[in-house]
Image: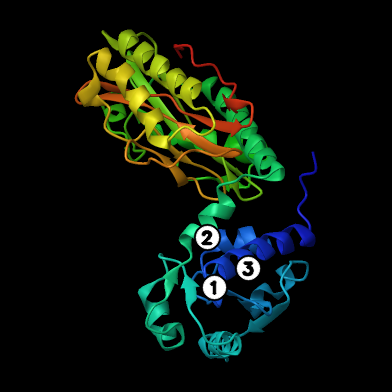
Amino acid sequence: MRVLLTMSDYRERLGELRKKLAEEELQQAVILSRENICYLTGFCVGSNERLTALIVNGKETSLVVPKLSQGQVRDIGVDKTVTWDDRDDPYAIAKEIIGSGGKGRIALESQTPLSLYMRFKDMFGPDPVFADQLMVALRQRKRGEEVEFIRKAVEISEKALEETTQEIKPGMTEKEVAGILEYNMRRNGSDGNAFSTTVASGKNSANPHHVTSDSRIEAGSSLVIDFGASYRNYSSDTTRTFVVGSIPEGFKDVYETVRKAQQTGIDCANPGIPAGDIDIEVRKVIENAGYGEYFTHRTGHGIGLETHEPPYINESNRSPLQPPATFTIEPGIYIQGKYGVRIEDTVLMDEKGTRAVNSFSKELRIL
């Protein structure tokens, strides 16, 4: 499997975007988000407070970047790179390029900051359209090299988790565990965290979005660890739930219900199935076990350059899942004042079906 992207790969992606623009009778697209620019060009730095803009029209593709990034844009697949420094007006530069692309409808991203939109609105005309669905159509179909990057991110994260479990003991704080895990991911080859690591112990584990704290891990408590590694800008997302010292009362039944529901989600996720049907089937398992009110979030989400991206695995999403795609299956049960359980895998759907990329055991484990 070739996993090094070349200039021709990015030119092919830009060509696919141009084709979609033509199909939708759009004159050009103005792309500002780091992830979409990264996908289309290989330039993955992001703009921060300095303008970075990718302008795609029928004639050429131009990337406007701060001069401090000039050493990082020499081998990317755009037709023209325009650099600017703090003495220049980058918005005037971008406007000139947009103006040269000809008159017609322009696509921009829905997350375009209002401050940037206001600077460009005279260029966009009265009816700009969102480029989001054009980009979703490209990015949701994961290519071979993207899958390999995600596999590697999962491999790094699981190795780090196993090493970290050897160090966990009662009395440590959640922050200590998170710090050890993040160090181990870096040591094993991660580019960084895919997102902020969650370590939730005891009653904190009943909060799906608990913010890792100074709480100390007690014997006889649950421990939910939700984390991910980034590798070549692609993410993994994994959650495992442990118990420390001994199993709390009633916990095993909750855990096994979540484990069964999670496997059900993987098993029913066949190519062409509406994303919402996976959520329905997973929810049935938890409801039939009597815990329906304690499952308070969607079953999963797409994963790639962003940790959360389409397709979203919730009941209202009736779009059929088309391979190759990568997404998570992550049901949970959260009983306030007691404990929570979540089990999450990054999964791959291809023409053969769906299977977990993860290999880390989902048997209940006592640390």
- Secondary structure under the numbered disc 1 in the rendered image: strand
Estimate how packed mark 1 is, as few (under 14), some (14 to 19) or many (20 or more) residues with alpha carbons within 10 Å.
many
Tag 2 residue: 134
Q: Is residue 237 left or right of residue 83?
A: left
Q: Nearer the viewer, mark 1 or mark 3?
A: 3
Sequence order check: which comes first, mark 3 or mark 2? 3
Q: Quadrant of residue 75?
A: bottom right
> Who's the residue at 37% across and 18% down the image?
258
Above or below for 279 versus 305:
above
Three-letter code, disc 2:
Leu
Mark 1 near mark 2, Cβ–Cβ under 8 Å? yes
Report x, y in % for residue 36: 56, 61
> Who's the residue at 55% across and 27% down the image?
161
Three-letter code, disc 1:
Ala
Q: Is residue 233 left or right of residue 2?
A: left
> Who's the residue at 59% across and 26% down the image?
353
Above or below for 70 versus 367:
below
Report, in whole angstroms, how far the alpha carbon at label 3 lies from the one at label 2.
10 Å
Q: Is residue 302 left or right of residue 338?
A: right
Label of residue 18 in the image: 3
Judge by depth and name the residue closer to the eye, 111 or 333.
111
Sequence order check: which comes first, mark 1 or mark 3? 3
Q: How is the image coloured?
A: rainbow
- Secondary structure under the numbered disc 3 in the rendered image: helix
Report x, y in % for residue 288: 26, 14
The answer, for residue 186, to whether it is visible in the render is yes
Three-letter code, disc 3:
Arg
Tag 1 residue: 29
Mark 1 near mark 3, Cβ–Cβ under 8 Å? no
- Secondary structure under the numbered disc 2 in the rendered image: helix
